[in-house]
Structure formats: structure tokens, C-alpha cells
Image: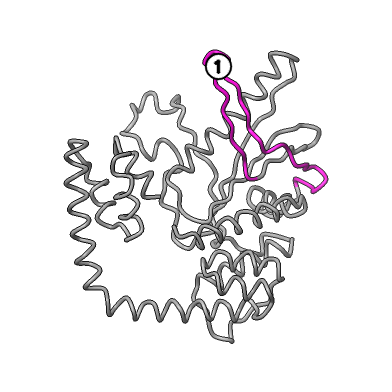
Amino acid sequence: MSKKNYMLRKIFDIRIRSLFKNCHVTADFINGILFYENAVIHYDDISLSDSNLDSHLPNQNITRERERDNIYLVNIDGTECLIGIEHQSQIDHGMFQRTREYDEMNYLQQFNLYRSTHQMIKGVMTFVVYYGQKKWKAPRTYEDMMNPMPPALKDYMNAASYPLIEMRNLDPKRFHSQELKELIIGLRYLYNHQYDEDHDITISHDIAVTIAALTKNTQIYEKVKEEKIDMCQAIRDYGKENLNKGKSIGRTEGINIGRNEGIIQTLIKLLKSKLGHLSKDTLATIQSCTQEQLDSLTVHIFDIHNEEDILHYLQ
């Protein structure tokens, strides 16, 4: 990932977390997802909770530190729970495991309080919200990565899944807050390639800047941020740029494929020599790498000790 893309990704992360610090937006989001518009949770039932996760493991003398994107203390009819929201701008094969760790650490913090003060433990749940264009194909549960479980024991296996929301597929009518409606409509406009003026939409500057960060195009982001162009014009420019890139790629595709094939075969030989064996899935993943991913594998070749390391450096 280039420095510019990394910067825009971080900008998106900061802005989307900030949006969901608004308890009106969060209450509307949870109601729209879980209760289809019914106002089971009101904005004054929600308060921001500490997103820092510092859990000490006394038996191992280890302290683990993590930070959640957004987490809330939610009170429904006098009963409290914790609800987390994790935001993803791109597919992450480690998201499921990381989310599981976050929930575990929330429980561990509460367990330590329970042991010292007998404060009762609150239930924890987490949404993962994905804002990308491609369909999410990463694991959502351990079961997605398992061999078949013994049928007689399947109901007892601890292989929990997590609610994963693909934002661009949501119906904006499920929500009442203008911010969520604009975010969903803006994502659809961006990803559906509706670049002509007949499909123009109106969204606020804050939401426009947030969506512009998803384009990973610094020039478009800066123009939208400085209000030199509106979001619709930015997306039209983005579409034209991608079209031109496609034409350019067509002219140079043969050269790039030939060069990359040589790098891929060399990397596969080195990795087989080091690890002894590569699964069909791993081989297929390497063979479909981008130039940037190939560069990452090459740089970290001596840090790879198993197939999980390969997938890590390809993220």
C-alpha cells in the first residue's frame, strides 16, 4: 500500500469513527439492522464506552493492548450490555479473529472487576461494517475455515460468527438519520458507476469527504475537501480516471504479465524450498497477486515461516 493510499485509509477510519460517535446515528444504525426501523434503542439509551482494551493475564504476566473502533454502553429497559462496531474499508481475512479477541478482552476486563468487586458482567456483541465494493469473502466464523465437524457435537462447538454488514447493499429506507441515508446512497453512487449527470445526488460535505477518502485518490479527496468540486463531479472524475487506467493497462498488460509470472514462479520455488509444501489455495492466492503484493512477499521472504505468514503479508 502506497503512503498516499495509507493516508486516505486512515482519514476514512478517523472520519467514520467520528460519525459513529454520534449516538443518534448509532441508535438509528442498530435499530435499522436488528429491528428494521423499530425504535427499540433510543439515542439516550447509548453512551460511548472506553475503547481501550488493556487486559492483564496474571498467570502469564502479560498485558495485551488493543483499541476498538467504537464501543457503547447500551441500556434497554434497565438492562445493560456492550455493543462494538468495527469499520472495514477493505476485505481483511484476519477481521473475524481480531473481533473475537476484542470481545474476549472486553469480557476479561469485566471478569477481573467481578473477581475484585463482584460487579456483574455485561453481555458483549460486535458488528463489523464493511464499506468496500467487492463482496466480502473473508471468513466470518471458525466454521468457514474448519473441516466438517462431527454432526453429533456440532451444536456444542464454540465457533461463533459475527454480524457483518456490507454497507453498500443496505436499503437507505431502513434508516431515519440523514447521515446514514447519505452514506449508503453515496456508496451506491460510487460503486454503481453512475457517472452521468442524470444520476446526480445531494449529500453533505462531511459525508462527501468521508466517501472521497474511499476512492484512494488524493487529488479527488483534496478537491472535495476544499469544496472545489462536489461529490458527484468527483465520482465522475473517478470513473473517467478508472476508464483511462483500463485503456492504459490494456496497452501494457502483456509486458506486466510476463514480468510478474517470472517473479511469481521464483517466489513459489523459494517458498516451497523453505516450507516444504504449499496448499492449492495458497498457490492460487500467490498466482493472483498484484505487483504490490509480490513486492511485499519479496521483501518479507525471510520472515515467512508458514502459510499464515504468506497470507498476512499479502493483506
Q: Answer left or right for 219 relative to 308.
A: right
Residue range of the region highlighted in magenta in the rendering: 40-69
Judge whether 293 appears above or below 94 on screen: below
Q: Amino acid at mark 1?
A: Asn
Q: Residue furthest bottom?
A: 197
Q: In the figure, is residue 276 to the left or right of 71? A: left
Query: Toward which corner of the image does residue 291 lie, by quadrant?
Result: bottom left
- Say which residue appears at 20% left-offset and 37% top-offset: 274
Classify residue 258 as left or right of residue 195: left
Left or right of 300: which side holds 275? left
Residue 132 belongs to the span the image colors magenta: no
Q: Nearer the viewer, residue 23 or 228?
A: 228
Residue pointed to by mark 1 = 61
289 versus 115 height, above or below? below
Residue 154, picture quadrant: top left
| Helix, strand or loop for disc 1 | loop
Which corner quadrant holds the N terminus? bottom left
What residue appears at the point 42 percent right and 48 percent down from the top-left corner? 138
Residue 9 picture location, percent across and down? 55, 58
Q: How is the image coloured?
A: one colour
* Quadrant assignment, res 74: top right
The residue at the point 62 percent across, 41 percent down is: 68
Query: What x and y, as percent, mark residue 18?
Result: 70, 53
Up-down relation of residue 265 to residue 151 (above or below):
below
